[in-house]
Image (cartoon, rainbow, N blue to C red):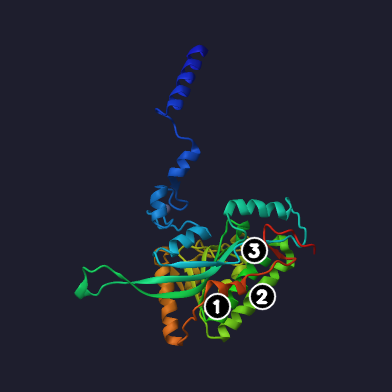
Amino acid sequence: MSLRDWFAKKKQKARLNADGVNRKLTDDELCSIWVQCYSCNATLPRKAMEHNQQVCMECEYHFRIGASDRIQQLFCQEDDTFIELNANLGPADPLTFTDTQPYRKRQVGARSKSDLNEAVVTGIAKLHRMQEPNDDAADTPPTIDEAESFALGIMDFDYLGGSMGSVVGEKLTCLAECALKYDLPLVIFSSSGGARMQEGTLSLMQMVKTGTVLARLHDAGLLYISVLTEPTFGGVTASFGTLGDVILAEKGARIGFAGRRVIEQTIRQKLPNDFQTAGYLMKYGQVDRVVHRHNLRHELLELIRLHRISSGKTPKAVSQGQLLDFEVNPSPFLLTPDAEPVPV
Ligand SMILES: [Zn+2]
């Protein structure tokens, strides 16, 4: 092909693209339609994946999901409600920490990536159970049964790897204190790489802080369900992640303290292929139950109902105005994103 023909063909191709005829899709456009499974490499329609709660239709691999997807999946009935607590609370920079980038810059990036002000969303949830008709009235539609209220925290890995800093600890502690005051069960979905190194020892202090409030919850006879999701590691596993009265793990989730490679290098031994997976931890008793994402809502509601009946603890009614008592004021380590940084 002569150079002139080559240019003519290129021009024709550009014209076809502009007209939208025979246009080749860009990589971004393809990614918006299809998604590839990390486990079985199947190419799956994105819409169908959303409908299937981000679980692979071929191999049931559970894709990692953020807090907003989790809320959408859990709150699927029309009457379900979620009142968020401390939504505007964001992190300060108490150590004025800089690694390859200043911590402030990382916060801005994390905020735009996750659409959140911190790595955890907390609030008071109310989910309605559907009553299936009995055999005598099989053709009548299901009706809404009693609702369960509980305090809910959901971590998001997209905000700095779901790391636990001062704000994560504070938000979860406020949530547990709210549960204590109104006799609510507490459910926390963990997804974290561990403590937030940019906040140094302040982030490690959140382990004991959350552990202490959970001990008070336990003494009060209230239920705490910890749900470990892909991935849960470090300080979160070593604190509130594994302090649940019931510890559930989402199918296929990786859960541990140190990473697999670090352990292999330290002990100089090869670890089993399924090491640090939900199934492996259940086999050795660290997790009570491995739950498929499709069954998670039902399992949570059943556990809360069983505990409510057996303990006789019924949650007190709580209004939106009463929840304002659990809104945190800015401090040197915690501040709202729009507030001026408080000098340390
Ligand atoms: Zn798959």
Could you say which is closer to the camera, residue 189 or residue 317? Answer: 317
Residue 166, horizontal then vertical, whole percent: 68, 67
Q: Give the residue at mark 2.
A: 209
Amino acid type, callout 1: Ala
Could you say which is closer to the camera, residue 297 or residue 339? Answer: 339
Q: Secondary structure at mark 1?
A: helix
Q: Secondary structure at mark 3?
A: loop
Q: Give the residue at mark 3.
A: 89
| In the depicted structure, whether residue 342 falls above or below residue 178 | above
Cα distance, mark 3 to mark 2?
Answer: 18 Å
Residue furthest front as drawn: 321
Q: Give the residue at mark 1.
A: 179
Cα distance, mark 1 to mark 2?
Answer: 16 Å
State which tag comes first along the sequence, 1 or 2: 1
Amino acid type, callout 3: Leu
What is the quadrant of residue 117 in the picture?
bottom right
